[in-house]
Amino acid sequence: MDLPANPLRDPQDRRLPRIPEPCALVIFGVTGDLARKKLIPAVYDLANRGLLPPGFVVLGFARRDWGDGDFEQIARAAAEKHARTPWRDEVWARLSGNIKFVGGSFEDDAAFDLLAQTLDDLRDSHGIPGNAAFYLSIPPSAFPVVLKQLGRTGMADNDRSGGWRRVIVEKPFGSDLQSARELDDLVDDVFTADDVFRIDHYLGKETVQNILALRFANTLFEPVWNSHYVDSVQITMAEDVGIGTRAGFYDSVGTARDVVQNHLLQLLALTAMEEPTSFEASEIRQEKLKVLRAIVPPKDVAKDTVRGQYLPGWVAGERVKGYLDEDGVPPTSTTETYVAINLAIQNRRWAGVPFYVRAGKRLPRRVTEVAVMFKRAPHLPFQQADIEMLGNNQLVIRVQPDEGVVLKFGSKVPGTTMEVRDIAMDFSYGEAFTEASPEAYERLVLDVLIGDKTLFPDAAEVEASWAVIDPLEEAWEGTKPEPYRSGEWGPRLADKMLGREGRAWRRA
């Protein structure tokens, strides 16, 4: 029975938090790193902030011989170690009675039957009227069998459950356009399209969402956000770490499939999209989709793309080994750990503006940023010696770490001469706001439980992104990546790619 709306609650009052209906979060692969380091801590942080309903259950599923108490102890250890908010025993005490576990393999029909029965039992024990979200924190190869089990048992059926049933799918969503379409068909056959949430955790970051606020809440930037004033855009995702223990996964995927197809193309779409008519999820996704479909891959792949693979070197003062020396990597591997691509967007706003996208591992430091490089003034009435230190105006959105925005522009140096050089105005989230930014998974898990799809790419976006990457992967087939020493900013060819057009990478 639907409860009447609270007449004293004003929907415009931003002090009132969004709180989901009573529901369960079912986590498949609950023993993995993602669940322990991100999902369980996110649940604790949401509870600590008062954003979960009293009727809320975390239900873990994995191949373990555990009881509810065993899982609760492991979940507590994960939350204590990785939670963002301060630890409070009273918060965990409320959560601990709502943590349950079902053991079994993905092929085990009896285990899934027990899971379905456990969800049904929550109606009486916890007052949860059939609402459940299923988080697939598992390898992509296991998606089909789990989805089929959810379909077989009826756990994905909204009508049968008497509430809502949603599924959360981690990237990579497919390995190419064809496999993505096949997976889309399978997911949509089990769940309705509206109940599928494809997670790209970058979209949960406050600074990524701030791209929209920066552009559409201010008159300062939008008039110059086009090819008349913008020279180029650089999108960088640099990591100082190697592949760690992910060799089995990473060597079959590579950097382009791992982060460019999803994270960086989503950043590009948010940077380049037109203003939506409203901030409804469908309107924002439609504008992003227009950008993704307008992307033109390089005609000369050898000239306008660079693939790299890290060699041994020094990072942050420590000696590190090369990619081919990592445990589990074949000695003849041609998988890239670095990629730089020159992309064009075929529309009126961005015609002629190159979008340089690069990502890599074992680079000098960890940073993700979007840098909008503006054209130089058409005429500079200064002595050449006075402007040697003057570069392009830049608007830099730092996604991580040190989240914030930097505006670089020219200013006179104090003194008797008219010397002009670059200075920076720096806005930092940590200094401007008293409240710390929530972790991306906090926001995204909450949005799933509420049913808000604004920050989740739909199937059309995923397919449009693969349509950009697939031709590049085909052209790279049979080629070897360029070597670069760990601790350097990628292969020298990446610098030459921009140098041919009179540009240089911004040193992030």
Image (cartoon, rainbow, N blue to C red):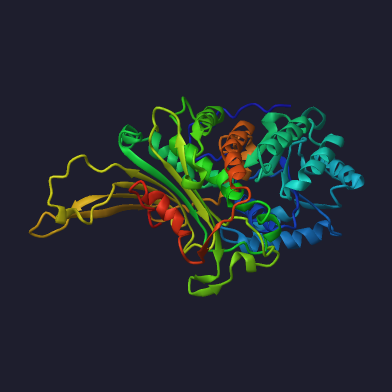
Quadrant for the N terminus in the image = top right
The correct choice, above or below, for 238 with respect to 343 in the image is below
Q: Residue at x 69, y 29 (%)?
A: 193
Picture layout, residue 65 above or below residue 194:
below
The x and y percentages for residue 238 are 49, 56
Give the position of the C terminus as an image quadrant. Answer: bottom left
Residue 108, percent across and down?
Answer: 89, 48
Q: Residue furthest right?
A: 110
Q: Position of residue 389 (x, y in %)?
A: 23, 56
User: Does the rendering let one see residue 82?
Assistant: yes
In this rendering, the answer to whether 395 lies above or below 131 is: below
View extreme (top): residue: 277
In front: 151, or 297? 297
Q: Nearer the viewer, residue 196 or 494?
A: 494
Q: Is residue 81 above or below residue 15?
A: below
* Residue in the image at 56% along x and 35% along y: 454
x, y percent for residue 405: 38, 49
